[in-house]
Amino acid sequence: MAPRKNDTQTSHSRIDLGEYGIAGTALRNLAPPQLYEVALVEDDARLTASGAIAVRSGAKTGRSPKEKRVVDAPGIHDDVWWGEVNVPLSADSFVANRRRAVEYLSSRERLFVVDGFAGWDPATRIKIRVICDRPYHALFMSNMLIRPDAEELAGFGRPDYVLFGAGRVPADPTVPGNTSATSVAIDFERGEMVVLGTEYAGELKKGVFTIMNYLMPKAGVLSMHCSANRGDDGDVSLFFGLSGTGKTTLSADPGRHLIGDDEHIWTDRGVANMEGGCYAKCINLAAASEPQIFDAIRFGALLENVTLKEDTREVRYDDASLTENTRASYPIEFIPHALIPCVAEHPQNIIFLTCDAFGVLPPLSRLSLEQAMYHFVSGYTAKVAGTEVGVTEPEATFSECFGGPFLVWSPMKYAHLLAEKMQRHQAKAWLVNTGWTGGGFGVGKRISLKLTRAMIDAIHAGALADAPTEPDDTLQLSAITACPGVPNEVLRPRATWKDAGAYDAAHANLARLFAQNYTKYA
């Protein structure tokens, strides 16, 4: 398949926003140098030594999932998994929030529009329009959406969804359904999303993901919170996991082609990335351990909430004084060997990544189809400090389908789609623990990236087909007990603990938590 050029339109253009009730015009799809110029002057951005710009997201340095709202309407009511993830909002309240966003945006001297696509597969992609007042947000979404070329932009037409980024103005807490000064609300029937009271750019990105998580399963396509890469022989691997479990790091493999680092779909034709860029955590980032990501942070990239050395403007990647959720956004083509277009064949390996804060799960396990569904629906991991507001240290959690906050349908709909596709295409399933060994958080230590990479390499090489295993029926897995490049004792978590009795107690507790959580779906 021939490479597809994927850069922004560089001409200076304006677009009228009157159809949205916003007074005036906006600068449309500015190129990164143009957005840099405005951000450095008007948005308190700073130029770093590598050529990226560094910005601050304000008081919110992570997502606010408790403030997510979905408009309840007859046409979608029976589709939505209502509850803590999808809290209903009335159409009148959405209109009130939208009015507040429109009034704020109309008052701004300069606005930006980013038009782009969600989804590299032409048969399923949708058109997204973002309206915002911070050049930082415009650059971020220009990186994260798939950038239309000049011809596509000229014929872009009416977008499928419009996102109003008005995060600098607080939500009105007197509006029914608003519970704080922050609101992230989606109306699927209107095709609109409104963000108030948070300037964290990740809300816009995950809003697009939520939209795709509604539309794709409705069409029989599996939407997935995963990264993906492809070997030279055409073998494709998917990496499921929440933020901080290693999706971005492990998929950016110098020996393989990156398809995408966070969001994908699985169709009857194969796998396709939803995004045009990557959004990597960069706390403690180092060139030696993650060279591809380190080198991608250059001109055109964006850094969130990092600190700089005053004299050299080098980034202090080890500084978590603002947040541990420091982030880098960059176009996917900044990664060497990225697969452009970001589409590939059906996957051979499904890898579930978990960050086990209890130090119980084996570093590497083989899963049957039934066990894979159990772990997919369970989505056990740990929330990593700073990823969400109020999380200050790793916290054990279960997140359905390794992406609970972004689901719209019942988790079982996604699970059934995954099972059907895995069975049809004979995909193998694995569970890889990137969390603690030798004890839980505060006692043991994090499994080294070097060893995790060796396990992933063994999966890709097909070296584990006949590897010995130890079944664990209570946790529904079979632990691999011999893997090239990994000491055998590391693969047996009980052997890494000084107190075997303490491990047994922690194991029993984790098994109880799994079983208790799964009763919701039994």
Image (tube, grey):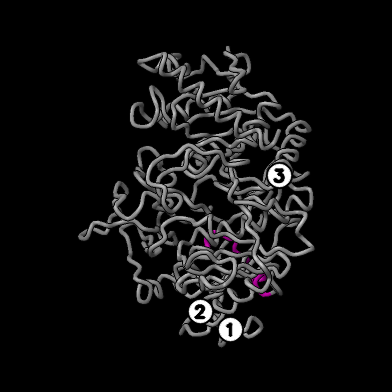
Asked whether, in this view, residue 310 is left or right of residue 42, the answer is left
Residue hosting label 2: 111
Among the two numbered marks 1 and 2 on one chain, the one whose residue lies closer to the N terminus: 1
Q: CA separation, marks 1 and 2? A: 10 Å
- Give residue 311's quadrant in the image: bottom left
Query: Where is residue 325 drawn, in percent x and y?
Result: 40, 51
Question: Residue drawn at (62%, 32%), measured in percent from left and top?
Answer: 375
Q: Is residue 469 magenta?
A: no
Decide which of 223, 231 is in the foreground and name it: 223
Residue hosting label 3: 266
Q: Is residue 502 above or below residue 2?
A: above
Dot 1 amino acid type = Ile
Question: Residue drawn at (50%, 43%), measured in percent from left and top?
Answer: 248
Q: CA separation, marks 2 and 3? A: 36 Å
Within-10-Å neighbours for mark 1: few <14, some 14–19, many 20+: some
Decide which of 187, 92 is in the foreground and name it: 92
- Give residue 501's quadrant in the image: top left
Q: CA separation, marks 1 and 3? A: 37 Å
Decide which of 95, 47 is in the foreground and name it: 95
Decide which of 37, 164 is in the foreground and name it: 164
Please say if the residues under marks 1 and 2 sit with CB atoms less than 8 Å apart. yes
What is the magenta range?
142-154
Quarter holding the C terminus is top right
Residue hosting label 1: 22
Dot 2 amino acid type = Leu
Question: Residue drawn at (43%, 47%), measured in percent from left and top?
Answer: 293
Asked whether, in this view, residue 21 is left or right of residue 266, the answer is left
- Give residue 415's quadrant in the image: top right
Among the two numbered marks 2 and 3 on one chain, the one whose residue lies closer to the N terminus: 2
Query: Where is residue 478 drawn, in percent x and y?
Result: 60, 18
Mark drawn on residue 481: none
Query: Where is residue 145 drawn, in percent x and y?
Result: 58, 61
